[in-house]
Image: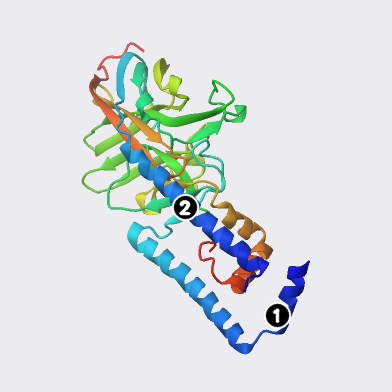
Amino acid sequence: MGWIAEHVESIKSMKIRDTLSQLITLGMIVSTALIIWKALMCLTGSESPVVVVLSGSMEPGFKRGDILFLHMSEAPFRAGEIVVYNVEGKPIPIVHRVIEVHEQENSGKVDILTKGDANPVDDRSLYAYGQNWLKPQQIMGRAVGFVPYAGWVTIIMTEKPIIKYMLVGALDSAGETYLLF
Amino acid sequence: MHSFGYRANAVLTFALTILALMCAIASFSDNFNFPSPSAEIQIVGFNGFKKKPHGNDEVSLTMNITADLQSLFTWNTKQFICSDKLGFGCPMTIWNPFFFVFVAAEYETPQNSLNQVSLWDAIILAKEHAKFWIQTKNKYRFVDQGSNLRGKDFNLTLHWHVMPKTGKMFADKLVMSGFRIPEEHSV
């Protein structure tokens, strides 16, 4: 219990100069996170270079809470690649494997079909109504790297916002953990 | 300045840094594995040929797949404990390294410069199952975008995708060419 009293004491004896210094530190953390994020966007060519897996449709490959690193290049999409795509009218992107590609030479039109490894059927029912094929424009990137569990921080923070504020508070008082962001 | 929060924060930061470093090293070590996989696919027979109402050709076939992919496993290959809910058929209830394989047909048509259609896939559980022989019908439908499958030459490609415990994912393939869908169909 001693440390609580110590904290209260330290808050009481806080000076304006310390408060300002902590605010600046917090600003530094936020801007560092932003710099890293934007730099990753430039390097990977993907508008969201890091995504968190939210469903179990790619088990056993990806579980809920895993983090994927995306890469977007000019190279055409091929069967077997794991891609992250958006469906019109759905807010959450989907991570699934490409199982069919039909590519027209002249018009450059590409038809793609995807499927989750753990799903019994392909994704036609997930696409927008009347859409039989996925278009390359809907794809945000290919999954190239993988870190297990790390996405749980994001999932917990999204579902329990109170923890986010506690974390920001902790960062504010300590001001050194850049990694947590 | 040596409060509980400060110390806990320092320990956490240090632990996460070390963990990230170890993950990076584990992923990097995968580069020193030079796998030598081998595979062969034979088509046993064509079982059916259908022209769907809107004009697309569909073929069903039976193939023999022989492969030795044991050298793909490394110590950074992802493992999982089998659960029946996934229905992949588990050899044992321990942590199994695994990877994903699939066979795709590849062909050209006048309309499309490339068509890739997955015919079969599987999750290989455990090293002893990475050397396998299987006779199977196509698990997914072999449907063309049009009616070009009669007498069509095509390739069969065995792809594999190895999930790491952490880090970079590995995928590669073996192409087998010289397959042909017959002109005449008894069915």
The chain carrying label 2 is B
Q: Classify mark 2: helix, strand or loop.
A: helix
Question: How far is mark 1 from mark 2, CA to CA?
Answer: 34 Å
Question: Which of the two residues, A55 or B13, is positioned nearer the viewer here?
Answer: B13
Dot 1: few (<14), some (14–19), or many (≥20) neighbours within 10 Å? few
Is B51 on the left-hand or right-hand side of B175? Answer: right
Image coordinates of residue A162 in percent, x first then y, are: 68, 64
User: Looking at the image, can residue A76 be seen?
Assistant: yes
Which labelled disc corresponds to residue A11? 1
Q: Are marks 1 and 2 on the same chain?
A: no
The chain carrying label 1 is A
Give the labeled residue for mark 2: B20
Classify residue A78 by image quadrant.
top left
In this picture, is A140 found above or below A39? Answer: above
Is A56 on the left-hand or right-hand side of A68? Answer: right
Residue lying at 28% horizontally and 42% vertically, measured from the top left:
A103
Is B174 on the left-hand or right-hand side of B135? Answer: left
Residue lying at 58% horizontally and 52% vertically, measured from the top left:
A152
Q: Amino acid at mark 2?
A: Ala
Is B20 on the left-hand or right-hand side of B44? Answer: right
User: Looking at the image, can residue A45 be seen?
Assistant: no
Residue lying at 37% horizontally and 32% vertically, measured from the top left:
B160
Which labelled disc corresponds to residue A100? none
